[in-house]
Structures are given as C-alpha cells and as structure tokens.
Amino acid sequence: MAADARVRVRTFAMPFGEAAKSVAVAWPEAELIGAPADEQSASDFEAALVWDCGPEPLARFLDTQSGLRWLHTTAAGLPPEVLARAAARDELTVTNGAGTHGRAVAEHVVAVTLAHLKRLPQLLAAQCAGRWQPPTAGELAGLRAGIVGLGDLGRSTARLLSAFGTEIVGLRRGTAPVPEVATTFGPSAWQRFYDGLDLLVVAAPLTEHTHGLIGRPQLSLLRPGALLVNVGRGPVVDESALIEALDSGRLSGAALDVFAAEPLPSDSPLWSMPGVIVTPHCADATAGTERRCLDLLLDNIGRYRSGRALRNIVDPARGY
C-alpha cells in the first residue's frame, strides 16, 4: 500500500494514553475511528484493531465490511462467530496477540494454585475473625499436573510449575512432543492424560473442537481432591459437571478466571462454593501484558504499511 494513502481504521476499546499515541505515530496516514455515529453505514474500513469487543458486535461489524483487509486482536483467541466469517474471506488477514499473555497467566496459575494448597483463603478468613487456626498445607513438588492446550499460555505455565518440582503432562490437538512437558498426549489418548491428575490447568482456546471438552467423564478420572484451574475459555469446561464435581468432593477446589457467561451471574453457585476462587477474567491484566501487546501491534503496523508478512496470522480453520 502507498505510505501516503489515507487508511480508515476501526478501533475497538483502544486505551487512551500511550497506546493511542503510539499507534497514531506508527501509522500517520491512518484515520483512527472508534464507534462511528452510524455503524451500519460505515462500511469502508480497511483495517480493524481490537483491544476488547464482544463476539456478536465484532461479527456484525465484519458482516458490513466487504473491503476489510486486516483484523488484529490483542487477544490470543477469537470467538467462533468471528472465525467463521474470517474463513469465508480470502482477502482478510487476521492476526492475534499470541505470545503476549503467557507470562502473566502462568504467574496467575501458580498464584491461585499456591493459594489453594497453602490454604490462604482459610487463613485470611481466620485472620478476619481473630482466630489462631493453622491448617495443614500442601506442596507443588511431587504433584502431577495436566495442562490442556500447549500454546503460549500452556507452555509458560508448564515452565513455571516445573520449577517447583511438579510433574507436567500435556494434552494438545497434535501429537508432537513439547519441550516444556514431560509427556504429550493427543486427543485419542485423553483417558491416559486425565487419569490421576492432582492439578488440571485449562489453557485451551475456544474452538468447535474444545467446546465442552472437559465434562463428567474427564473429571471423573482426576485424583480425588484434585484442583481445576481454568485460564483458557469458560465453555471449554462443562460448568454443570464442574459444579457437580465440587459438590461431590471429587474436586477439592477450582480457580476460575473464565466462565460460560461473563460477567459471572450473581446467582451462580460458584461465587460461594467452598474451595472456589473466582477472578473476573483478569489473569493477564498486567502492565507487562499491555506493553507486549502494544509492541506486537506496532511491529505489525510497520509490516502492514510496508507490505511485509504479518506476525501471528490466524488460521480460521484451526481457530488460532
């Protein structure tokens, strides 16, 4: 594309401050537009930069944009509604934020797992009540942890957990070994993967293959008293099966950052279930993540302007 041509770029929830200034400097010919006054008539965008947007509004936007050439999202995953539309558009290139969230999410996984093992919620409750009530705590060393999804989130989590002496196994769509994981299982070996896990970490994106991937059969194979941590996408786990496993004691707890419906409805039993830690989809909400997301976007803007290959191109058929 010509460097001096005006380019209309739709932005979704672009942060004010450094991000907006940096994008404007990196793409001087871009006309950066938030929500147009008449969204339906604004059908001439060449690119879209997405920090945050629900799947339905983003899908509706794509339906009106026959001339869109590039869609970038800072998220690592894209909802099925958006992927389906991207798959039907050969002229549209989609890029994502893969590789920018793993460090923060891995630290979150370790934090909530240690909080569970060291009984921090109980200790804090005892402190508030003025009770001297030391519990018996657990250790990460020697536990068998299974990670579903071995992209940036899964591999980063595996590296951190391994440093504590945790045995790591992984489940992925392919069967090729992953250096960060002791044993890698493919989909056909799912029973061997789940069998006897002390800790199950869900780090998979939401695709047609992962929706409802973890339900009663999978949870029943975990070691009694296991912990489930979900930092992937809520619908990957059957929420009703999860609640049953918590109620029955099959699971001693769960640390959940993502849910089938977000925000988590106020009447959900997960808010008050013993052993459950609820966080509002914030595992990657760090200044470091924001910086890495912006650096990747600015690099891709430079590549787009000069006609070079973009980084993190999404395969709509795979979902990532």
Image (cartoon, rainbow, N blue to C red):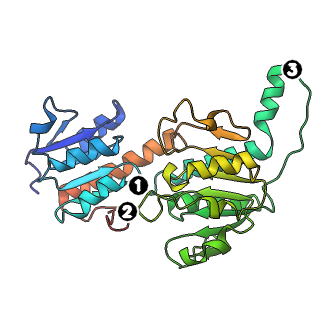
> Given the image, on which type of amino acid does mark 1 rest?
Gly
Sequence-first disc among 2 and 1: 1
The quadrant the C terminus occupies is: bottom left
28 shown above or below 193: above
Question: How far across and down, in percent of the image, does residue 165 sit?
Answer: 77, 62
Between 140 and 61, the residue placed more toward the observer is: 61
Sequence-first disc among 3 and 1: 1
Identify the residue under disc 2.
319
292 shown above or below 157: above
Q: Secondary structure at mark 2?
A: loop
- Say if mark 2 contacts mark 1, CB within 8 Å: yes
Between 319 and 162, the residue placed more toward the observer is: 319
> Given the image, on which type of amino acid does mark 2 rest?
Gly
Question: How far across and down, in percent of the image, does residue 280 sit?
Answer: 53, 36
Identify the residue under disc 3.
130
Left or right: 320 in relation to 202? left
Q: Secondary structure at mark 1?
A: loop
- Taking the spot 53% from the left edge, 79% from the top edge, the residue there is 176
> Given the image, on which type of amino acid does mark 3 rest?
Gly
Identify the residue under disc 1.
77
Residue 252 visible in the current orientation? no
